[in-house]
Amino acid sequence: MTARVPTLGVIGLGLMGGSVCRAARSAGSCDRIVGFDLDVAVPLAAQQSGVIDAACESVAALGAEADLVVLAVPLLAVPAVLAELAPALREGALLTDTGSAKQSVLLAVGESLSPGQAARFVAAHPIAGSEQSGLDAARADLFAGHKVIVTPTAGQQREALQAVCDFWRGLGSEVLEMEAGHHDEVLALTSHLPHLLAYALVDALAGEKDNREIFRYAAGGFRDFTRIASSDPLMWHDIFRSNRPAVLAGLDQFMARLQNLRDAIDGNDGDEVLRVLTRARASREYFLRLLEERENAEPPGVTFISSAGKPLAGSLRVPGDKSVSHRSIMLGSIAEGITEVEGFLEGEDALATLQAFREMGVVIEGPNQGRVRIHGVGLHGLRPPRAPIYVGNSGTSIRLLAGLLAGQKFDVEMSGDESLARRPMRRVTEPLGRMGASLLTAENGCPPVRVQGNHPLHGIEYTLPVASAQVKSALILAGLYADGETRITEPAPTRDHTERMLQAFGWPVERSGSTVTVRGGATLRAQHIEVPADISSAAFFLVAASIQEGSDLLLTGVGVNPTRTGVIDILRLMGASITLQNERLAGGEPVADLRVRHAPLHGIEIPQELVPLAIDEFPVLFVAAACAQGETLLTGAEELRVKESDRIQVMADGLQILGVTAEPRPDGILIRGGPIGAGTVISHGDHRIAMAFAVAGLRARGPVIIENCANVATSFPGFVSLANQAGMHIGMEEGS
Ligand code: S3P
């Protein structure tokens, strides 16, 4: 904590300076407070109300007394105040300020203070305030939980920097360091520009002939937008002028965007208007989410506590298929016309793809209860995004986009979260390179991935070294942009949603045996897409109902594309009772209701040809194996080691913690069925590991506590409430 300051001197006793006095007093940061204000009446009032202990008659008088001087005057007053302060300052006194622009302050410091004094000046900007002004508005808690940016300089004394930072921390704020020029640019955009616009809008309306009429009917929107125009005009006058270059640059950029919007309205370009509005709304939501995370300094982890539940019964629908949701956005975006999607998975992975296309200029309405409207821009209508694309946890987004973006005329950089940053990308960049594309990864072959545009693509013949639908799809999507034929042969069948959806959009795809062929140069026509319920999400309930005595559960509208039903086949081989009812086709994909009843399971050797057809379901299949009689052996599944986590190791570790015999192998695992104990397991941020252990809790002797479950939202938002509705018993706690 702060070393106590004997005498704190505050120059400028408005909202900011007055709040420094009150906060320092309540935190016990100083023994005594002296104050000065350019308005002579203010220090006397401050003394009377106990905000300060003594009013100083001049800046010089304050300088002679104070051990730490806080300058809280309007920015343009800073040079004169410093000039008066310099000759009077006590030896060794520290200085700081509260100005919203930092370069102008540091310039004045250099001009007025001696080098020794300047070395003890620590420029600071508390990101706190309100539209109220004056001493009466001052609050002891103004800085609590807010940031203070300090902008250190080359010649600064380290002890001075430390002591001033401690002082600001003592008032309850979080201190960050930034370079002064960068600070001024960032604040020009995030704070100065909005204030300028709010003042300008109110003033423009006030200048209208019928202004009374206008203000009488001004609704909440006007009030919200212009609240900050009630701030102190003198302070903002000084800020705009002190931070002139950065404010002007921000304003110019903004005026160009405003002009663009004006032109779009003028030219009846509804698409452009909607593009700007949908993108802005999504950005604001994203920004608010970031803010929320930041406010909870450590983003809260989520812990699941799963214990014995009831028999699973009734009928439920799990959320939409993740793979189909991703592809609906991708193909809808590069199709001609408006694609309507129903049942879209509003999980973070698919939303990352959606946002990426918005960033590339596609107007996308929704999602709203699973409904999305995509205003396709055609095969060549995507635009360069304004910033790198962030896809979070989503391997499908980054790999499929690598293929689709390889054929564009612009460069794009893509990155993701910690888990994605460890996932192999050469499996796509290498064959795409053979097609003529130029993609760069980090040295270890992992993200970020930089796709360089303007590299003409040509078709190739390629045999996939691993059975991967993501790699196959990336090459097919690049093939749409390539000259000639792209022929891809897979070592084993993998999910074929890309091929099916392309055909539904009118793009010819040939399939012969294990080879898929596409040719460049056709057109995609917008479609209506019904996304089936995700069999990968249904899998948790297929296993849960199978292992829980008395269960009889109906899962409706589940996608049963034969390239995805490995989980049903494997469970049936283990003795599960699963029947398909009401089989039908929805948007080119087979769909059925799955009825699953409890049945005793027994261990099996999992046939290798089923591995790619159940690739995402193994975590929960391992739980089924733990509940089965005898041993279950999985081989030929080394791919599981490079999913969102090393799913072989992470599941083996967790099962062992719960007392289950689980021997990991390089390409699989051996699990011996037996009793499951209570314990705490770690999901390593892998959604499917978290949900698999939640299912294990059904049969455990005591609670299974699963840490780090926030990522369940990537594929299965609402998992816990749906599971509990079905009969499971999962509690949720914040913190991991
Ligand atoms: C997916 C393919 C699979 C799967 C992933 C989704 C897809 O990945 O694990 O969850 O949508 O194409 P691989 O291609 O790496 O096997």
Image: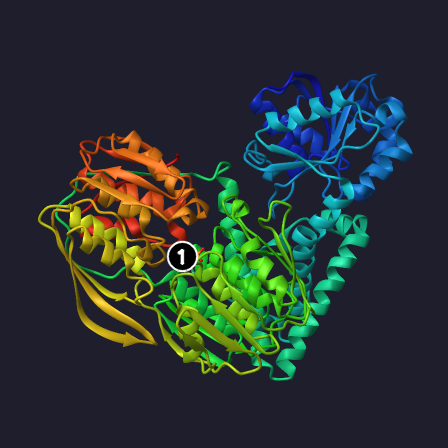
32, above or below 653, in the image: above
Question: Percent position (x, y) of residue 612?
Answer: 36, 57
Farthest residue to the left: give it: 550
Q: Is residue 305 left or right of residue 485?
A: left
Question: Percent position (x, y) of residue 541?
Answer: 23, 53
Q: Which quadrant of the figure has residue 168?
A: top right
* Residue highlighted by disc 1: 347
- Residue visible at 20% across and 35% down in the picture: 700
State ligand 1's quadrant: bottom left
- Residue visible at 59% across and 63% down in the picture: 432
Q: Which quadrant of the figure has residue 24?
A: top right
Question: Percent position (x, y) of residue 407?
Answer: 62, 70
Q: Which quadrant of the rendered structure holds the C terminus?
A: top left
Q: Is residue 415 left or right of residue 199?
A: left
Q: Which quadrant of the rendered structure holds the N terminus?
A: top right
Tell which of 402 and 103 is nearer to you.
402
- Residue visible at 35% across and 66% down in the picture: 369
Tell which of 275 and 17 is nearer to you.
275
Q: What amino acid is found at the position of numbered circle 1 in the picture?
A: Gly
229, above or below 102, in the image: below
Q: Is residue 260 left or right of residue 421?
A: right
Secondary-structure class at tag 1: loop
Residue 220 visible in the current orientation: no
Question: Percent position (x, y) of residue 421?
Answer: 55, 46
Residue 677 visible in the current orientation: yes
Q: Is residue 26 left or right of residue 39?
A: left
Residue at disc 1, CB closer than 8 Å to ligand 1 = no
Looking at the image, what colour scheme do you see? Answer: rainbow
